[in-house]
């Protein structure tokens, strides 16, 4: 029984399919007919269509050609295949660029682009916005109630920025609304530095390589503006669609942790979250590193949707062609990685692309149907296997994990850290640091949300904030209430340094978090690559941690004020100084890890923290290295996913609950033996307890 509604009442179970570009094959009706047959053979029930079809839909200004799309959608409907119908704003036709040059994007160097590429448009341009609205209105009028169409795929992978005069004016207007006066802006941006005080709004320009780019508050606000303008452009796209059929859901496909846009700002305009996943699966000798990062991004997208299932909108069924090395997926890996998306809350597995393009820059990108044009390929068999798997576990669609732990990954915090100028300009590695903390919970089989600092903390037992450099207004108060109420908070080095304008807190770091953590950070030592220190656990510490661990890159020199010391530095002039602390605060506790420590510490530390917090893992046994355990539930049944991201077999001991096999390896004598890259999906009765909260 689904906890959340599926994307459309017409849908039963999971979506399986991919990007479909019939406009590239309009001169080959035999190929279009064969596509339908092969889709059914591979158990594909959805396509994303029309994503880059503007030139085929409007070959001349005001001249529309919808007949080909009518025919394709009618064929899909007749064969029980759904469509996510795209709006084509990601790439406009050449006639528009020629007639209306203002729609072309201007780069940071103030040079206007030529026609070409994707998203080479100005999001502020009234002409482009009107053209998009007109196209979307016509699409909605014609197809919003079509039997094949179950949702809107708005544009494609929004990204980039424009520095044209229209965007400069819009930026100034945005700043006026944010600050109200130049006096407040100058204070927030600390423009007295280098005598950069502004005396007129017209003096403000976006960051430029040949102009101003050293005012950190300005750089931060420009990135916020780019997100705000992109969100507003997206909203402009959606309005005519919703006017015709407000019940038809809309989504747009995100790009993982793409740094250019703060995806949290899109939540209020989208009905469904979706993303495009292209890991470097075989960059390492095993898949574990990529599996951890991909799992984290799946959890991020589920969290962006408030816990409801998301859509895996794009993945490759075989290879990409735009990464440095286009390496094939090994046998079994496509099924494994597709199931991973489902385990973390996806209600679809979709691909780029259905059929390989014959020419242009993605002609060698993986596809379900190769240039050979038939089903007798390894990739087609792999895709068909996924289709069969999704049919067998269809009852899981609409369920979601229950989560008690969260890791903060915040776009604005990343922007500020990367622009801070110190302490390691060779790389602060914010995202890598977040992943290392997430990985510790992944290894323990702990379902985890990936949130930003504005999310509700009260629903969790454990909140982890790696390098919370920026602390926006209200965040410290909510963390204070969270810990006082019994929550567990983990913070690290380089936290509580600056406010929302990237102005350093006065009175000592970690700023507004100081009383919660019970420490004062006096200095931070940045180590050269190859340098290290050692951190040793104190005897008799409350977490029963032991041993010595390598510290590298960053070592913060802190004073324990109200906190107790769990571990100390062993080398350099700060030997014996606190390196890990715990502070009792109200009914809860707050930990501070002052150094970047090796993964072995992360695993041991979080294993102890999770146990002390009363958080139950998916399976009450130690997981073998490289094996992941995830769970989705409908409140009556748990669906447990065991996935082996190594090429060698691994055995998982189950607890004493009753498990029923649903797909993959079957338990024997209380164990599940997973072959290399093997999977097992089991179901068990859900036990409501204090260990879980939705």
Image (cartoon, grey):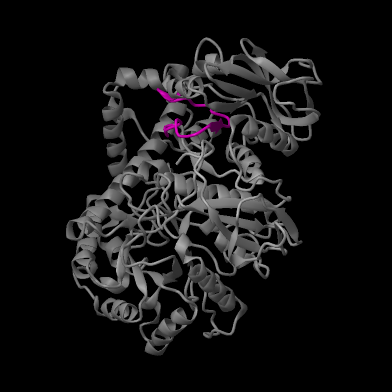
* 186 horizontally vs 138: left or right: right
* 243 horizontally vs 409: left or right: left
Extent of the magenta region: 454-475
Q: Position of residue 367 (x, y in %)?
A: 52, 73
Our reading of the magenta stretch's main secondary structure is loop
Residue 57 is at least partly visible in this image: yes
* 623 horizontally vs 421: left or right: right
Between 446 and 114, the one nearer to me in the picture:
446
Q: Position of residue 351 (x, y in %)?
A: 49, 67
* 536 horizontally vs 422: left or right: right
Between 81 and 378, the one nearer to me in the picture:
81
- The quarter of the picture where residue 229 lies is top left
Placement of the N terminus among the 4 image quadrants: bottom left
Q: Position of residue 639 (x, y in %)?
A: 53, 56
Q: Is residue 450 above or below residue 90?
A: above
- The quarter of the picture where residue 62 lies is bottom left
Q: What number of labels is visible? A: 0
Q: Is residue 617 above or below residue 310?
A: above
Q: Is residue 315 above or below residue 187?
A: below
The residue positioned 18% from the left and 66% from the top of the image is: 141
Residue 257 is at least partly visible in this image: no
The residue positioned 63% from the left and 56% from the top of the image is: 642
Examine the structure image and report whether residue 469 is included in the region drawn in magenta.
Answer: yes
Q: Residue furthest bottom?
A: 30
Examine the structure image and report whether residue 472 is included in the region drawn in magenta.
Answer: yes
Q: Position of residue 424 (x, y in %)?
A: 64, 30
Between 201 and 34, the one nearer to me in the picture:
34
């Amino acid at each position: 029984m689904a906890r959340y509604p599926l994307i459309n009442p017409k849908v039963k179970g999971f979506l399986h399919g991919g990007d479909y570009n019939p406009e590239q094959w309009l001169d080959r009706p035999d190929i279009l007919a064969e596509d339908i047959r092969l889709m059914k053979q591979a158990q594909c029930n959805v396509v994303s269509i029309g994503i880059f079809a503007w030139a085929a839909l409007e070959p001349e200004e005001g001249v529309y050609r919808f007949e080909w799309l009518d025919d394709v959608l009618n064929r899909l409907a007749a064969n029980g295949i759904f469509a996510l119908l795209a709006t084509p704003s990601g790439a406009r036709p050449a006639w528009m660029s020629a007639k209306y040059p203002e729609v072309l994007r201007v780069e940071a160097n103030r040079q206007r682009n030529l026609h070409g590429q994707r998203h080479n448009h100005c999001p502020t341009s009234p002409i482009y916005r009107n053209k998009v609205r007109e196209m979307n209105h016509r699409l909605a009028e014609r197809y919003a109630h079509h039997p094949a169409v179950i949702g809107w795929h708005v544009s494609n992978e929004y990204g980039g920025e424009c520095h044209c005069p229209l965007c400069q004016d819009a930026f100034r207007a945005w700043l006026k609304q944010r600050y109200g006066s130049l006096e407040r802006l100058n204070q927030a941006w600390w423009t007295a530095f280098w005598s950069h005080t502004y005396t007129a709004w017209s003096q403000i320009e976006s960051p430029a390589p040949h102009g101003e780019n050293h005012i950190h508050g300005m750089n931060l606000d420009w990135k916020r503006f780019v997100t705000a303008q992109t969100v507003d452009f997206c909203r402009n796209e959606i309005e005519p669609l919703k006017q015709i059929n407000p019940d038809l859901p809309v989504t747009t496909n995100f790009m993982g942790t793409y740094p250019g846009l703060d995806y949290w700002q899109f939540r209020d305009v989208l009905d469904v979250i979706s993303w495009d996943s292209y890991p470097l699966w075989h960059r390492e000798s095993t898949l574990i590193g990529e599996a951890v990062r991909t799992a984290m991004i799946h959890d991020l997208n589920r969290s962006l949707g408030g816990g409801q299932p998301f859509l895996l909108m794009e993945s490759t069924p075989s290879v990409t062609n735009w990464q440095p090395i286009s390496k094939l997926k090994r046998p079994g890996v496509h099924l494994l990685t597709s199931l991973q998306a489902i385990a973390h809350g996806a209600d679809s597995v979709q691909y780029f692309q259905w059929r390989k393009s014959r020419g242009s820059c993605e002609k060698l990108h993986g596809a379900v149907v190769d240039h050979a044009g038939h089903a007798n390929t390894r990739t087609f068999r792999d895709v068909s296997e996924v289709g069969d798997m999704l049919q067998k576990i269809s009852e899981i669609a609409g369920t979601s994990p229950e989560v008690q732990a969260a890791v903060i990954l915040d776009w604005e915090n990343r922007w500020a850290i990367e622009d801070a100028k110190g302490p390691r300009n060779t790389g602060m590695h914010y995202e890598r640091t977040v992943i290392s903390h997430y990985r510790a919970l992944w290894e323990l089989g702990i379902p985890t949300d990936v949130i930003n600092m504005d999310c509700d903390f009260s629903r969790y037992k454990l909140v982890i904030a790696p390098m919370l450099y920026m602390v926006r207004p209200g965040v410290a108060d909510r963390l204070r209430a969270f810990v006082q109420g019994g929550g567990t908070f983990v913070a690290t080095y380089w936290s509580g340094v600056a406010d929302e304008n990237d102005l350093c807190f006065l009175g000592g770091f970690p700023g507004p978090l100081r009383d919660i953590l019970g420490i004062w950070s006096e200095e931070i030592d940045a180590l050269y690559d190859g340098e290290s220190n050692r951190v040793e656990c104190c005897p008799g510490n409350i977490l029963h941690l032991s041993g010595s661990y390598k510290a590298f890159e960053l070592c913060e020199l802190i004073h324990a004020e109200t906190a107790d010391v769990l571990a100390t530095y062993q080398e350099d002039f700060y030997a014996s100084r606190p390196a890990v602390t715990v502070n009792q605060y109200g009914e809860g506790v707050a930990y501070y890890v002052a150094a970047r420590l090796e993964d072995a510490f992360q695993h041991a530390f979080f294993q102890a923290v999770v146990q002390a917090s009363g958080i139950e893992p998916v399976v009450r046994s130690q997981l073998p290295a490289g094996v992941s355990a995830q769970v989705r539930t409908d409140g009556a049944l748990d669906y447990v996913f065991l996935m082996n991201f190594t090429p060698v077999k691994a055995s998982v001991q189950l607890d004493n609950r009753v498990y029923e096999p649903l797909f993959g390896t079957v338990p024997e004598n209380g164990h599940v033996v997973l072959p290399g890259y093997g999977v097992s999906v089991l179901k068990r009765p859900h036990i409501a307890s204090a260990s879980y909260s939705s």
